[in-house]
Image: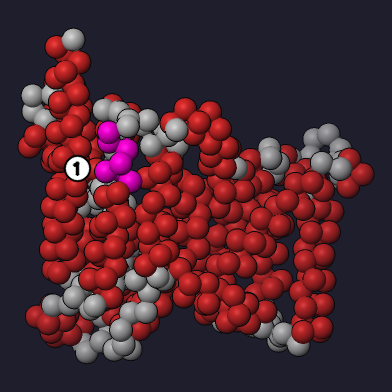
Amino acid sequence: MFKFLEEKFVPVASRVGNQRHLVAIRDGFIVIMPLIIAGSLAVLINNLPIKAYKNFMNSIFGEGIWTQWGGNVWGATFAIVSLLISFTIAYSLSKSYGKDALAGGVIGLASYMTFATYGDGGLTGLTTGTGGIFLAIILSLVSAEMFTRLSGNPRLLVKMPAGVPDAVAKSFASLFPAIITIGLLALIRTLISVLFDAPDVIGQFYTLVQEPFMGLTNSWTAALILAFVPAFFWTFGIHGANIIDPFMQTINLDAIARNVEALEAGQVAPYIINKPFFDAFVNMGGSGTTIALIIAIFIVSRKNKQYSTVGKLSAAPGLFNINEPLIFGLPIVLNPILFVPFILTPMVNVSIAYFVTKAGWVPAATVAAPWTTPPIINGWLVTQSLSGAILSVVLIGVAVLIYTPFLLAANRAAAKQNQQ
């Protein structure tokens, strides 16, 4: 079975993981991640569930006035996220083709704006914020593809005389590809508006496609799939998180934004599944909840020299959710004993976390903490609740119990091998 998967499946999976467009989406979101974290921390500061803290802030700055700072940070991050990714994804894809990446990014932003504006050119919080993410991704990829292909056509190249600054020459080299790309997408936008009576394309697309899609992914089945895929790919040495990340990001930012809006309105947060949820309750120590594997190694594998040594070396990175030393050091990759708990553990933990959150025992995740935030602390931060930290502790304990019998089996196999 492993031989078949290694020979047939792994090469295909590797190509998928390195697929140009998926990599561009991933890299585009990575660029804006500091802004997303800044926006999330502003939400945390504004909504820290400590009454004494809120009373103290109100006494210094006035009732509710101090929250304007967090609102301004939110406006500079989450409120313009669709505009940001329309640039960064187009930039990344253009760069991968070896073309003028900066021009590609600018044209990606302009192409999205042809769809984002309505009426006399107005914008809404939906079109600039998380509501336009899906279309921003699609249009940035389409515009970058068009631009890079047109840029290679010598008939469209405006050659400038020698001595002209490089910046000016590059600008004119992109002139006709930019005009054609933006013009064609603007024409498509116009035809959609006329034929389907859709003056607000982003808003209607959100209502018809993005919002229902978000609902479909907000289920236990989706949670299981999202937990299974990265761990499964990792068992073959393929960076599973990179493969699933573009999909996670498309549902992530809008889910966080809607949760925040619901909580501020005194309602129940509608979306359980988002990236902070997975970082806090599933990917503790890295994919496979490997912080628990390290703990289990210290408990039952101290006499297994290989596992003990790798466990000690992996402990410090594991606290910050970096588990490559563990995955390739034990190894977990193509390990017939450890690949089972490595896949099973995140699926069990995501199930527990999903139903506990759905029952209302733990608040939904509303803060995007840095993915390197240590476990347990992360659970508290993303839920803004002590119950989130307690759930993290419980899930680590469950994961240790799952890993332990498999480690004992690995110990026996190692002892038998040493005797031979």
Q: Is residue 297 visible?
A: yes
Q: Is residue 155 magenta?
A: no
Q: Is residue 294 visible?
A: no
Judge by depth and name the residue closer to the eye, 409 or 354.
Answer: 409
Q: Of all residues shown, which one is farthest toward the right?
A: 155
- The residue pinned by badge 1 equals 403
Name the quarter where the C terminus is drawn: top left
Judge by depth and name the residue closer to the eye, 135 or 182.
Answer: 135
Q: Which residues are magenta?
A: 337-343
Answer left or right for 290 relative to 405: right
Answer left or right for 40 relative to 416: right
Identify which amino acid the numbered label 1 is placed on.
Answer: Tyr
| Quadrant assignment, res 413 | top left
Q: Residues within 10 Å of mark 1 (few under 14, many from 20)?
A: many
Residue 383, percent from left and from top: 24, 69
- Identified at 16% across, 81% down, the residue is 54
Identify whether 81 is placed above or below 194: above
| Quadrant assignment, res 69 | bottom left
Identify whether 374 is placed above or below 410: below
Chief SS of the magenta region: helix
- Identified at 45% across, 59% down, the residue is 248
Q: How is the image coloured?
A: secondary structure
Residue 300, percent from left and from top: 9, 34
Residue 223, percent from left and from top: 38, 62
Answer left or right for 10 relative to 367: right
